Image (cartoon, grey):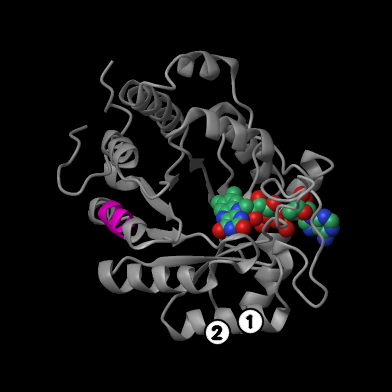
Amino acid sequence: TDPTALVTTPSGLSVSFEFSPPKTEKAHENLWAAIHRLAPLKPSFMSVTYGAGGTTRERTHATVTEIQAKTGIPAAAHLTCVGSTREEIDEIARTYWDAGIRHIVALRGDPPLKADGTGGLGGLGYEPHPGGYAYAADLVEGLKRVADFEVSVACFPEIHPEAPSADIDLDNLKRKVDAGASRAISQFFFDPAVFLRFRDKAADRGIDVPMVPGIMPILNFTKTAEMGRKCNTYIPRWMTNLFEGLDDSPETRHLVAATVAIEQCRYLAKHGVKDFHFYTMNKADLTVALCHMLGVRAKAKVVA
Ligand code: FAD
């Protein structure tokens, strides 16, 4: 079959790219090499993560404003509740608004990793900061009080690790949307059918904002699987099989990763998904290839 056939109207798909703020001069160069390749694809926005507990506050701000100024593409700042008072968060938000940043990805964040192994990614052991925004829904409400930001939030097709049930987690997503979020970006997942079921359940609940799949191109399978365990992302047995024995073969691994991700994206596109958010890990290669195959290209058009 024609692999481009499902993309009948390439311009009908929109993509967004997520980056993390660089720590070193070299990392800054690498990030910009990636942005230079990705920006011509005209993403609807590019977002920059916020380190656990605000550890990247300045670097996130610098990266977000630099992206918007140099590429002209709307940039979104991730912001979390962890470790800050409401006043501090409101001040950060005002600074973004004054700098022309109009889009915030509002998150609760995870607690810092403790010596006993609790905390960190996945969020177990979270305690709200006294005087802070307790959960993402409270943060969305607070941001909307500061200014009329466009707000995106997180959603979890395989349930957030701390949520007692799928229904309770969906109630939480509904609260975030009711508070003013206009888009939900999903945690990464590998079984696209799981995402589609989640999207449909959310629609049944009256959650009427776009549900955007978070696509994680696999750069390192072992690390991704480890992250998946913490975040409640199911790693299918077939995927472990596919990457088995490739630890020392980066180029082959790269080809396998591209195949896995494109199959996932094509399946989603075939089932009506129009928006894709890519966790780029500050690297362009796989994301450019995926966008290209979805028909999202700098110049060339896919002929239907
Ligand atoms: P919330 O929506 O607040 O939910 C967290 C948990 O609390 C859920 O289990 C929910 O059901 C429960 N809950 C909500 N309200 C209540 C309540 N009132 N009482 C009791 N329980 C409640 N982390 C970062 O540190 N920096 C980032 O830049 C970052 N970017 C991300 C981007 C995306 C697209 C995604 C999907 C995640 C990102 N994360 C980031 C991770 C995120 O912070 C964690 O997944 C965190 O554990 C949950 O965040 P949340 O915004 O979904 O929290």
Contact between labelled residues 2 and 1, with CB atoms less than 8 Å apart: yes
> Which amino acid type corresponds to the residue marked 2 in the rendered image?
Arg
Spatial distance from mark 1 to mark 2, Cα to Cα?
6 Å
214 relative position to 129: left or right: left
Helix, strand or loop for disc 1: helix
Mark 1 neighbour density, 10 Å: few (under 14) some (14–19) many (20 or more): some
- Residue 218 found in image quarter: top left
Tell which of 245 and 175 is nearer to you.
Answer: 245
Quadrant into which the N terminus falls: top left
Image point (32%, 65%), residue name: 73
Q: Which residue is identified by label 2?
A: 94
Say which residue appears at 82% left-offset and 61% top-offset. 127
Q: Is residue 145 left or right of residue 303?
A: right
- The residue that appears at 80% across and 46% down in the rendered structure is 116
Judge: label 1 CB < 8 Å from ligand 1.
no
Q: Position of residue 196 (x, y in %)?
A: 57, 33
User: Which numbered circle lies on residue 90?
Assistant: 1
Magenta residues, dominant SS class: helix
What residue range appears in magenta?
29-35
Q: Nearer the viewer, residue 222 or 95?
A: 222
| Residue 221 in sight in this render | yes
Q: Residue 226 is drawn in which quadrant?
A: top right
Quarter of the image where ligand 1 sits: bottom right
